[in-house]
Image: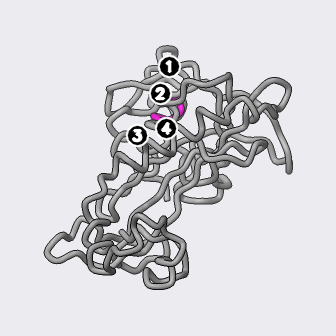
Amino acid sequence: MAYQTEDRSINRSLPILPDSLSDVSLSAISQGRQKIRFLLYSHVFYRMNDLFSSEDDKTFHGWRLLSVDGSELSVSSDGNDMSTYGGSKKGSKHHFYLANPLYDVLNHVYLDLVMQPGSQKNEDSAFLELAQRYEGEKAIFICDRGYEALMTFYRLNQTDKHFVIRIKDESSSTSILKHYPTPDTEEYDIPFDVTLTCKTTPMSRQTGKPTNTSRPIQNIRNSRME
């Protein structure tokens, strides 16, 4: 991935360098960039957030609103390294990284980031990692469709994380709602009791028959909601 984020070339950037670096050649700068460790960027990122955290004081009734969504960043192929080559959300395959940022909606600041090469992208695991790493004030995590997975809900509940995740309409073949009865109204707010089990065919204790309110853990683990 390129280290330069400006639209100016190295040659145009040289005049603004300190006098002590005025004699540095273009090739030396180009080679030197490759020696910068990734940890430097993450260190600067977290340090900047720590320094200005006192100014990020906007909340929703005392709760921080933190959104998570994945974005694909196209990159050039790197020799024989095919880890960045994977299937895009649009259906085609190309070289990219999936950036999964944690964004404070009210204070307009990025708090954390998980980067995944294209062949290893997994938004569910990235979201869970971001939620588990967050140690700030009480927060509500907000996600769009694509993060709806019962195992994700379970793990967030186990760690006392609060969240709002939009899910597909029950008419979708991959919607969680298709397993549960819903009222024929445009809006509703009702709870669903779900039991996670290791049994392949969950059975109701009352009737001894298969039930839709229990979901096998292995099926949830292997399912991918796109």
Q: Nearer the viewer, mark 2 or mark 4?
A: 4
The tag on residue 220 is: 3
The kind of secondary structure the magenta stretch mainly shows is: helix
Colour convention: one colour
Check residue 226 for magenta coloring.
no
In the image, is 65 to the left or to the right of 193?
Answer: right
Label 3 CA crowd tier, 10 Å (few <14, some 14–19, many 20+): some
In the image, is 200 to the left or to the right of 135?
Answer: left
Query: Label 3 is placed on what type of residue?
Result: Ile
SS for tag 2? helix
Which residue is denoted by mark 2 in the rendering? 155
SS for tag 1? helix
Residue drawn where x is 30% and y is 52% of the image: 37
SS for tag 3? helix
Instruction: Report, in whole angstroms, how far the alpha carbon at label 4 lies from the one at label 1.
Output: 15 Å
Which residue is denoted by mark 1 in the rendering? 158
Would you say the residues marked 4 and 1 are in contact, meaning their CB atoms lie under 8 Å apart? no
Please state which of residues 96 and 196 is positioned toward the viewer in this rendering: 96
Which residue is denoted by mark 4 in the rendering? 130
Q: Nearer the viewer, mark 4 or mark 1?
A: 4
SS for tag 4? helix
Which span of residues is magenta-colored?
149-154
Residue 55, percent across and down?
Answer: 76, 34
